[in-house]
Amino acid sequence: MPFTGWRLARPSLPLVAATAAAFVTLCGLGAWQLDRLAWKTAQIALREARLTAPAVTLAEALGDPAGTEFRPIRLSGRYLHGAEALVGMERFGGTVGPIQATPLQVTDGPIVIVDRGLIPVHSKEPARRPHSRIDAPVQLQGHVRLPPKAGLFASPNDPARAYWYRIDPAAQLAHARLQGVASLYVQAVPDPASDATLPVARPVAAQLSNPHLGYVVTWFGLAAALACVFLAFHLRRPAGALRAQESRT
């Protein structure tokens, strides 16, 4: 047996405390990533199921915004271009620019904010994209979306200066002095029958970035490595056994 006669040296209390704290922290991070992995997997499955589910009516979406998020929806109405907002900065395909969020006066219904797609940076001024400002009644297909929550370090929207960092139906409607739906918005999807080049609508992605399994392996692997290093550092061979081995050699 290679470890016959070996024993563990008595470790110092500060080293034990530091190692235990690091071990618990690493395991905690691994457990947290396991929870994130389960949550992200469930979110992907939820999106896949809802994106392919039957379309909901606006009344159904308003009755349960969270329960109908990502479900298809069809609306008809007229865009209120004077109250549009250019939001954030995104990239889709070869287009980089803000989201064109425009209120839609739904036929026989309320006003709903519509994420129509991206406007290239060089076409932000309305005069450069007159074909994106449709005056005729429209019929659109899209998906129900909930307004994103502001992160802890996210910049706040500043409607007075036309600085929009995320879609906020309530703030956009209030700034335009309009009454409408604040609990949700609609993300339009590409219309194959349309020959309009702007805005550039993009599909709602079912897949989300999900690197959490790798993080789980990393954190638990580091915890195991720390434990092995701690044991190896304190593994000692008795002096008698060492002298006996030297005498045989």
Image: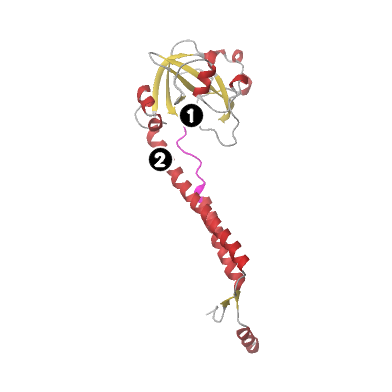
Residue at image coords 35%, 31%: 53
* Residue 24 is one of the magenta-drawn residues: no
Residue 5 x, y percent position in the rendering: 56, 82
Write the residue at 54% across / 13% down.
Answer: 82
**Image-quadrant location for residue 63:** top left
User: In the rendering, at what x and y percent does residue 28 appear?
Assistant: 52, 54
Q: Earlier in the sequence, mark 2 or mark 1?
A: 2
- Residue named by callout 2: 45
Q: Position of residue 179 (x, y in %)?
A: 46, 16
From where the camera sits, is residue 116 visible? no
Q: Which residues are magenta?
A: 204-213
Tell me the number on the disc at residue 147.
Answer: 1
The secondary structure that most of the magenta stretch takes on is loop
Residue 50 in sight here: yes
Q: Quadrant of the C terminus?
A: bottom right
Neighbours of disc 1 within 10 Å: few (<14), some (14-19), many (20+): some
Q: Nearer the viewer, residue 20 or 130?
A: 20
